[in-house]
Structures are given as C-alpha cells and as structure tokens.
Amino acid sequence: IIQNHAKPITLSNLVSTLQIPPSKACFVQRFMRFLAHNGIFDIHERQEDHEPTYALTSASKLLVSGSDHCLSPMVLLNTDQLLTSTYHQLGEWIRGEDLSVFETAYGTSGWRFFFEKNPEYFRLFNEAMASDSRIVDLALKNCTSVFEGLDPIVDVGGGTGTTARIICDAFPKLKNDCWILHDWNEENCIKILEKCKYSISSKGNRGKVIIIDTIINEKLDDPDMTLTKLSLDIAMWTIFNGKERTEEEWKQVFTEAGFKHYKILPIFGFRSLI
C-alpha cells in the first residue's frame, strides 16, 4: 500500500485503505511507531496538521511483493506458528533423547515433516529459500574470480537450487550440484564435504568447493550482526539439529574432510564465501 502510494502516506489514509475501523486508528499509530523504531518505516509529520505520515525504509523495501529482491517469503517462513511454537518444547527436549527440538514438537525430523506432511509449508519454504538465494547475484559482481576457470561447481545452498541457477547463468559452462551444510551436524557435514572432495579430485580432476554460509565472529562483528547469526544458529539447532559455525569450527570440519586450504571472503550481510 505504501509502495503504491508513491509518497509518504498519512495515518488516516492508511487506516482507510486497510479498511480498519476509525476507532482502531490509535492502535495502528502505536504499532507503526513501534515498527518505525525498529527501522521498518520512517515517520514524518505533515506540516499543515501534524498528522503522522509513513514511508518505506531500505528494510521494508525488501518486503515489497514483486520486487527483484523481495524477502517477504523468508519473513513469513520464520514467523510462521509452525516454527515459533517449536521453541515452546525446549524444556521437554532438554530432558529427552530427541535429536532436535522440532522432533520433540512434531514427532519427526524437520525435513521429513516439510516433505511428507505439510506441502503448503514446504511450498513456503522453497519460496523463502529462493528469495534468499536471489541476493547471491549481488555478490557475484565482486567475486567473479572465484568461479573463473571452473567446469563443475558444487553449490552448497538450499531449497530448489536458485543459487546454483544464478551462478550458472553468470557462468554458463559450469556444471553444478547442490547441498546444504548449516542444517547438518558435524558428522554429516564432514560426510558431505568428503563426497565433494572426492568429486573434485578423482580421475585427475581439479576443482573447488565453494560455500556461501555464515561465520560467527563475536569479536569482530557488531552486536546486530552477531544477534542475527546467533539467532540463525538457534533456528538450525531447534529445527534440524544443525548449526552456524565459527571459523575454527569450519576449519575443523574442512580438515576432517581432507581439505588442506580454505579462504574466506565476506560478501554480503551475514554471509561469507568460503
């Protein structure tokens, strides 16, 4: 609504457009004030009558449906009651033997639940992963040298392979496969990387494993960035029994999988290219 308005929208106009009873306008104003304080909207005041007006910020522009880098499916995924209710089972999980909190809440693993028991949520999951992966094309502009000279590519991503398609659109000669790492524990993560290493080094092949993922660094990151990364770590733990890793934890996984060298390039947001 605010995007289509093409200029800051007044409180009265917003309430009218949303067909909210005028008696509830004061509550809309209070909620918009809260969202503005958290960077979702900008609040201005109209000079002639001092009525508040609202405009989009950089954050809320990422939530506009139909935009090139719309992340609203990711927000809907992470605020869905199916996920948020999982955290209510932490007390029961900590005293039990289930691998993940999600398993305690729903009686099965996160992946099996998404694939087999809740197709509507699985659709939302795929939309969220695709929207998140589209941000990758912003990083390719500054990281093209990483992909040059490769024939096959291992894209450690997720969802329906949007990341792989973006990379291969930029580098049409690449062949690719797609795995995920942060939703696996150390044992399974090492197994995946061992298979990757075998694939790029067998039969005289030489290649790279390229990972786009999170690296936790509480000493160097600002508090907001650390909060984002640690929140994602909690999500991976509760849903999949996975984790976000520090550089030292990544190094240990690489070493046990047989890799001798790695390089880290911070690329965008909380992601790094390894």
Image (cartoon, rainbow, N blue to C red):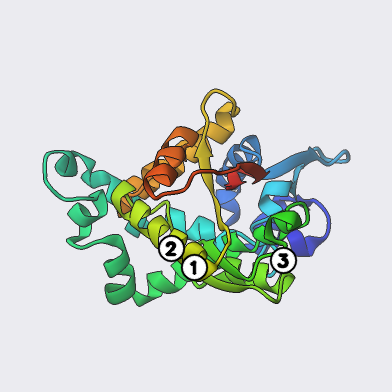
Residue at horizontal 60 percent and vertical 42 percent from the top: 263
Q: Which mark is residue 198?
A: 2
Residue furthest front as drawn: 204
Amino acid carrying mark 2 in the image? Tyr
229 relative position to 190: left or right: right
Measured along the vertical axis of the image, is residue 272 above or below residue 160?
above
Q: Which mark is residue 68?
A: 3
Reading the chain from its start, which is encountered first: label 1 or label 2? Answer: 1
Instruction: For mark 3, give the secondary structure.
Output: loop
Neighbour tally class for label 3: few under 14, some 14-19, many 20 plus, Cα within 10 Å:
few
Q: CA distance from mark 3 to mark 2?
A: 37 Å
Q: Quadrant of residue 131?
A: bottom right
Q: Which mark is residue 178?
A: 1
Kindly indicate whether the residue at mark 2 contacts the one at mark 1 (C-beta within 8 angstroms): no
Measured along the vertical axis of the image, is residue 238 above or below residue 36?
below
Amino acid carrying mark 1 in the image? Cys
Kindly indicate whether the residue at mark 2 contacts the one at mark 3 (C-beta within 8 angstroms): no
Residue at horizontal 59 percent and vertical 46 percent from the top: 271
Query: Visible in this render: residue 127?
Result: no
Q: Quadrant of residue 162?
A: bottom right
Using the image as rendered, state which of residue 248 and residue 11 is in the foreground. Answer: 248
229 relative position to 234: left or right: right
Amino acid carrying mark 3 in the image? Asp
